[in-house]
Image: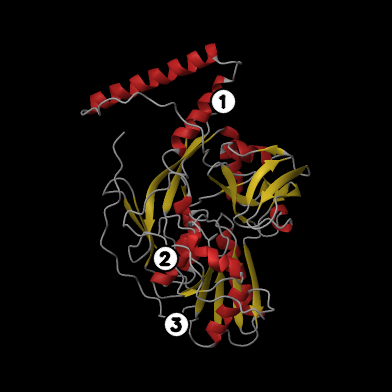
Amino acid sequence: MRKWLMGPVIVAGFIGAAIGAGLPALTAIAAPNSAAEKRAETFRQLELFAEIVAKAQANYVTEFDEGEAIEAAIDGMLASLDPHSSYLDPDDFKDMQAQTSGEYGGLGIEVTAQDGFVKVVSPMDGTPASRAGIKSADFLTAIDGKSIVGLTLNDAVKQMRGAVGSSISVTVVREGVEPFDVTLTREVIRPEVVKVKAVGDVGYLRITTFNEQTVKALDKGLEQVRREVKGPMKGLVLDLRDNPGGLLDASIEVSSRFLNGGEVVSTRGRREADVERYNARRVNRFPDLPIVVLTNQGSASAAEIVAGALQDRGRAVVLGATTFGKGSVQTVIPLGPNKGAMRLTTSRYYTPSGKSIQGAGIEPNFEVAQVRLTDKEVTEIKTRAARYSEAALPHALENDQGVERKPPHVPADMPPAEYKGEDYQLDKAVELIRAGKAKVVKAVAAATPAPQEAATPATP
């Protein structure tokens, strides 16, 4: 079974948690004590559910598809556990497998559900969504003029999918502007997972996602950036902004390119024995080169693993904004022929120092905003909720170490009013390297932190 670290949903490839549908409210009964009593109570509840389905079908104002209703109940049951557990029907399961291979059809946009709305985590580079100007934190409220507010994420995403070459109109709600419509043409998504360039004597490498193609593309990118930088390379900028994550294995391999062995991440599940530690392979390509990792609120899961590992191990400094804060691991469990699969949260992950970032995110060493806040935004920022983070999602897991995300605040460094450049965070990262402030501690094997007991849910 493959380990996943993805939080958001990639439209037209991967269907995630369906928010909003759920099992009917069940009669409150005193908690059973023995295992036999618990099993008997489960069967009673299932009988109640079957009775409700039958009575609804017999008495509802119109006939409905019982299969769809039961599937919605399964979706709702799993979504009530946490925002990343979900049911994948056979078609969705195939789409997910295609998406991890690195090529699939769709719009190229990662979304999640929040308060009955579909919220954009980030558009993928070079895709219809990116070219149309859709941005992180946008809300999508209608498709082809028909409202999707209140739909499950599963249903909303299915409406966004369609034949390659067909068009779709999406209504976008963005803070501070009037709602507007965007027309997108569906296409085969072949994400360019790694981009490189030389910024003078500094190398720049951007990773957009963590799939089966990432490591191979990264190795090619590292060789390319060596060639493109003229003269000795002073440092490397690793851009993980708006990277929604992906496969756990890919995050370990990416970290290995910058660490000389030692721990990258540990995962801890429901039982004390469910502890796994993942170490970097000894393939460090730039052992003494200063590295700055760029992050923002769209950096999630696998991207946070890499940023947290390099930061904790003293191998890189992190610059930008606090990350999304997804500190859980999902396992995809096939359910048999023509039954699809279940994506279930099975463990939490911890950085090499033993820190959980669930809900809290990775805080940068240097907090730098990408755009300058207006006077109105500065005035209002302290009254705004932290709406764009893992902690804001319905049923999000709590941080088992009690760590909370910092409340909204004015960033320590913002572009000055006269700034005319294109990427302020990248400019500051390059400046940091050239000034010798991207402190490097030569990578050594990390000390293994003492195991910490994971939160233990009640036994079903």
Position of 150 compared to 22: left or right?
Answer: right
Whichever of callouts 2 and 1 sits on the residue coming sooner in the sequence is 1
User: Within 10 angstroms of label 2, few (less than 14), some, or many (20 or more) residues?
Assistant: many
Q: Is residue 384 above or below residue 30?
A: below
Residue kind at label 1, given as amino acid type = Glu
Structural crowding at the residue carrying mark 3, measured as other residues with C-alpha within 10 Å and reported as few (<14), some (14–19) or many (≥20)? some
Corner quadrant of residue 46: top left
Q: CA distance from mark 2 to mark 3?
A: 21 Å
Please give left or right for residue 49 compared with residue 373 in the image. left
Residue 434 appears in the picture as rendered: yes
> What x and y, as percent, mark residue 245?
52, 56
Please name the residue that numbered disc 2 is placed on: 280
Of labels 3 and 1, earlier in sequence is 1
Q: Nearer the viewer, residue 354 or 132?
A: 132
Q: Quadrant of the C terminus?
A: top left
Residue identified by numbered label 1:
68
Q: How far apart are the alpha carbons under marks 3 and 1?
A: 56 Å
| Secondary structure type for disc 2 | loop
Q: Residue at x 48, y 48 (%)?
A: 393
